Amino acid sequence: MRPPARQYSRPSARSGEGTLDGLHSGPVQSGVGYRPEEYERAGAEWGRRGRLQDELLETLLAAWSGEPFPYRGRTVRVTLRPYTRPHPVLLVGGSSRAAARLGLPLFPSAHLPELEAYYREQCAAHGTEGFCMMPAERTPLLHVSEDPERTWALYGGHLLHEARTYAPWQSKDIRSAVRSAATTVAELREEGVYRIVTPDELAGLAAESLVLHPLCGGMPVEEGWRSLRLFCGAIARKRHRPGSGEPGRCREEGAAGISPSPQAFCPWSPSRT
């Protein structure tokens, strides 16, 4: 979730993530976005995004406790508590200092060892414990197909659309694990940042991070589901449990995406905005 704005003014809306936890009992990711246009559209100040993120995290943790807490001059209590106790795993995306102060896990936007070192230093300084879910140095964005040639021909334009739309949003101060400079489908394919792989190729990848985006660039829903199911099957086979005679299970979670391993990230949205 990356809400930059007025949603912060409603603790009940944010604590609703606890309701989602009851439905899928999985992790929640928090971030504040990185486009000034998002803030302008929502009527929020771009320069306050760090403080808004801190307030969001503190409010979520307080709301999930089920106890009364002060919020902007009034006392608030949220009685609907998360299924996971004391609260769902809350991944903080980006470079929030509050993650270390609150003992929350950090999910950097790119392979940034210096940020991980700073995070661990701050955890030690605040007496908290957390972990850093660092993307690999090279993190391709994957789409799974039984016929990559056909899929490139049909849907390469969707991947290129996202790559070209996403690139201008990044700057020297904003880095992403997935970054492309391609201007044509051929360049995109040669570059290797966006990859269409078969299930067998996926199962053979030794990547530390697997990034799947089923609806990349407005991909048709049917094709997104096809890729997602092939991904599930490949990961289940890869995680075969020794001695059990049964493959490891890979759970589909519909529109919420799936997380077949702690370092598999599957955003399910028409674009990464």
Image: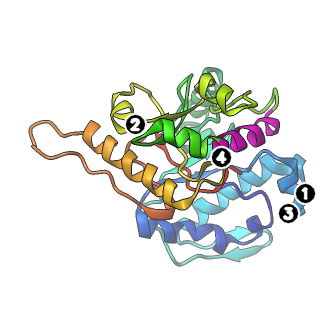
- Image coordinates of residue 108 in percent, x first then y, are 62, 35
Residue 40: image tag: 1
| Mark 4 residue element | helix
Q: Is residue 4 left or right of residue 156?
A: right
Q: CA distance from mark 3 to mark 2?
A: 41 Å
| Mark 1 residue element | helix
Which residue carries the number 3 mark?
A: 42
Please tell me which residue is depicted at 72% across the width and 59% down the height of the picture: 3
Does 164 appear in magenta?
yes
Please tell me which residue is depicted at 76% across the width and 38% down the height of the picture: 164
Mark closer to the chain start, 4 or 2: 4
Instruction: Report the magenta residues as a range.
Output: 157-170
Give amino acid for label 4: His
Which residue carries the number 4 mark?
A: 158
Q: Is residue 271 left or right of residue 257?
A: right
Are dots 1 and 2 in contact, CB under 8 Å?
no
Q: Nearer the viewer, residue 220 or 179?
A: 220
Give amino acid for label 3: Ala
Q: Residues within 10 Å of mark 4 (few under 14, many from 20)?
A: some
